[in-house]
Image (cartoon, rainbow, N blue to C red):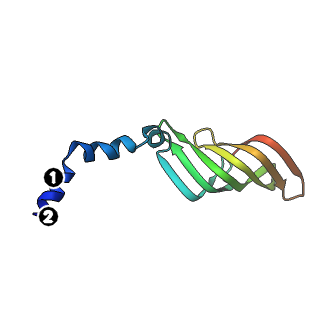
Amino acid sequence: MVAALVAGALFTKQLLWSPISAINMNDVITNQFKMSGASFTGTDKNGEPFKITAQAGHQEYDNPDVIYFDKIAGYTTQLKGDKKTKITFSAHNGEFNRVTKTIRLIGNVRVKTDNEQELQTNELVVQI
């Protein structure tokens, strides 16, 4: 008897449609893949390592080549001749384009090199 009542409740139009109508499909489509404590590592065109970490990140279903980050930080290496300079960066937000290998840093951007040069700006694009 209890099973019949539960099964009957599961197949009512009201119960079936209520959860579906509560889903925000725009959020599902725009934020298809979400991450917390995100970390992404790789090598640049010169074979030098880079690393990106973030408090959170997501990819959009319509734009899978770009990873969007919140509270981003990381490093890359600049190569001039045989001299290497490590560059660390941080920003409120960032966008990493995996195809063009660029990081767009947005909001309270801070960049520092290992030879003590510093830069502060609101937006910066870094080529990896």
Q: Is residue 95 left or right of residue 108?
A: left
The x and y percentages for residue 120 are 85, 47
Q: Is residue 62 above or below residue 112?
A: above
Which residue is tagged 2?
2
The residue indicated by pointer 1 is 8
Q: Can residue 58 be seen here? A: yes
Density class for disc 2 (Cα within 10 Å; few <14, some 14-19, many ≥20) is few
Which amino acid lies under the numbered mark 1 shown in the image of this protein?
Gly
| Amino acid type, label 2 | Val
Q: Residue furthest top?
A: 62
- Kindly identify the residue that appears in the image at 63 percent across and 53 percent down: 43
Left or right of residue 36: residue 32: left
Would residue 48 be seen by someone viewing this image from the given angle? Answer: no
Q: Which mark is residue 45?
A: none
Q: Position of residue 1 (x, y in %)?
A: 9, 63
Picture residue at 60% right of the left edge, 45% below the top: 68
